[in-house]
Structure formats: structure tokens, C-alpha cells
Amino acid sequence: MFTKLSKLSKLSKLSKTAVSAAAVATGLVATIGATQASAASAPLGHPRTAVHFNLAAGQTPENIALDRHGNQYVTFAKGRQVAEVTRGGAVRILATMPLPADGGVHTPALGFPLTVGITRDHDGTLYFLYATGTADLTGVWRMHPGGRPERIAAMPANSLPNGLALDARTHTLYITDSEGAVWSVPAAGGTATAWSTDPALAPAGFLGANGLKVHNGAIWATNLDKGAIVRIPIRPDRTAGPVQITATGLTGIDDFAFTGHGDQILAALDTVNQVALVQPDGTHTTVLTAADGLQGPTSIALRGDTAYIMSAAYLTGKDPNEITVHLND
């Protein structure tokens, strides 16, 4: 999640209102506040701040992808950059995106251009999103190892592409649009298609669909305003199945990751400066807070039993960083 401070000050009220509405509409009971973790939970241990980023240079880490060698690929939203972070914590800028002619002032909800979701293919190709409020730059971009960014799919200027995931089985990219949709694009490039525009993806005053993952034959996405996680099955013909709301009461939820324990999730709650462990039944418990070094967590990735948590410091205004923590069975 990426914000202007003046708008985020209103976000907690918006999220609480939207959560209540979502709970009534779906017949679910919202879990407001942390619940007790079940015996199947994976508690976290040994959190440490692994990397400090340069806020003055716009190094606000928005999203993260990992490779098998321990390197990380990160989008710096306000810097309009894609960077590599090595195992030793060195930061190398791979690309800086062009500033739109109007400065990005028409970027929906935000008013500034930003690099957003990122994912990595097995051959090292990076795919990432750039949102500018202009038709010439907004969309899905690709960068081969050692190459330069190229746009492979345009998205509407009035869209706000945010989360990104690759379905390796079908070579399809899925994109959340915080204006209220999930889009699909062939990984080879081509036309972006509005895959789902279900109301569960819509904003309730600010930002709707946000983080996104492909998991067990479905698209899973968060809704920041509604504090919810939704699951959308991918049908055999690749169309979207009926939407299921799997969890609510997750105020300010941004990105998330599956822990490897079925449908159990670690979720970044940006606006309340927490990480939550979400069980398959939708209940959740707070497992990390500001006391552990969080500075407005935006994204989470896992390698083995290690979670990498990026904080962009959008609200705190200090020390954007990366925290690593171990998941203990």
C-alpha cells in the first residue's frame, strides 16, 4: 500500500466501516482485533532488521520477489525504481522509470507515479507494475536479466495496478487494480483483460484490491479499505469463479504470503503497523508490531522458514526497512 499522509489519516475509519458492511453482506462474523492463534499456527521467532533503506532517495519498498540464491528484487514506490537487494544487504538499482509528462498528478487516489507489484520468472525475468495516471506508461513491464524495462501490456490510465503474480502453469500474469478489479495478461505480453470486477474488490473510499497471490488453483487478493482477503477460483477455461471472502477484520491489509501450512497466511497490516497470522478459518492473531522494528509493512515473501517483511514507512516517515523472521513449527 502506498499513500499520501493526509488520506491515510482517514483510512482506519474507512476500513472499520467497510469491514462491517462486508461482514453483513457475506454473512460472516468479522474478527475485529487479534484472536488467539490455533495449535496449527506457525509462531515467529528471532525478528531482526536486516536492511535499512534511504527514505530521502524515495526507497520506500512496496513489493518483493525472491530468487533461489537469496537475492531479492524490490520496487521502490516513490523512487519509481526496481532494485536488487543482495544476501548481504547491498542495494543495486536496476531501473528508474520515466517520469510522466504531467508528473503523475493524475495517478488515481494518490497523485504521484509509483512502481508497485513485482514477480520473477524461473529464468530471472522480472515483471513489475508502473502506475502513472497516463495511458503511455501505466501497465505491466518486463525486464530480462541485464536488460532494460519494456512495457508488455498497457492498462487504462484511470486504473491503479498494484499487486502482481505469475501463474507458471498457464504463463498468465494477474494484476490487482485498486480501483476494483483483477486483470489478466499473457506473460509473453498482449492485451490486458478485466478478469474479475466483483464488488468484493472495490474500494470503500480509498483503495480496494491490493495484494495478490496465485495459490491452489485460485487467485487470492486483499482489499485494503474492507480489511478483507478474498479467494477467486480459476475455472478450467481460465475465467473467474465465484468470489469467497475468507477473512475480515484485517485493518489496513496490504500484501501477504502463504506460510506453507495449507491456506495459512502472513499478512502485512500497513496502517496499524502489524503483521498478522491468518488461519484458514479466517481468525487471526498479531505476531509482529512496531516493537519488532516494523515501519508500516507493505509486503511479505517467504523462502523456506524465513519471512522477509518490507516496510515503506509511509505513515511513520522514518526508517523504511526489511525485517527477517523465522517461522517455527
Image: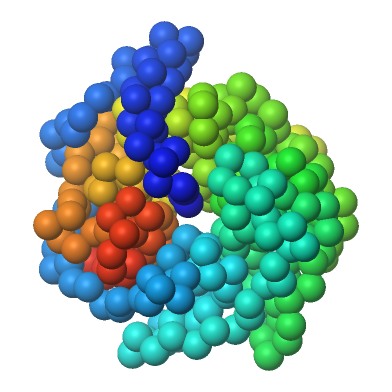
**In this rendering, would 7 be left or right of 116?**
left
Give the vertical position of 183 relative to 46 (above or below). above
Q: Residue at x 70, y 68 (%)?
A: 99
As displayed, is residue 252 above or below residue 173? Answer: above
Quadrant of residue 291 within the rendered picture: bottom left
Query: Could you say where residue 265 lies in the image, as x and y percent from the top left?
Result: 35, 46
Foreground of the two, 139 or 263: 139
Residue 123 position in % (x across, y down): 66, 80
Residue at 57% from the left image edge and 74% from the top image edge: 82
Residue at 63% across, 80% down: 95
Residue 272 x %, y %: 27, 42
At 28% from the left edge and 55% from the top edge, which residue is drawn?
Answer: 316
Tell which of 116 and 235 is nearer to you: 116
Q: In this view, does 212 lie above or below 68?
A: above
125 w.r.t. 199: above or below: below
Residue extending furthest toward the right: 190
* 224 to the left or right of 311: right
| Quarter holding residue 298 | bottom left
Tell me which corner region of the image, top left, top right, bottom left or bottom right, holds residue 178: top right
Q: What is the total number of numbered labels drawn onto the structure image?
A: 0
- The colour scheme applied to this rendered structure is rainbow
Residue 100, percent from left and from top: 74, 63
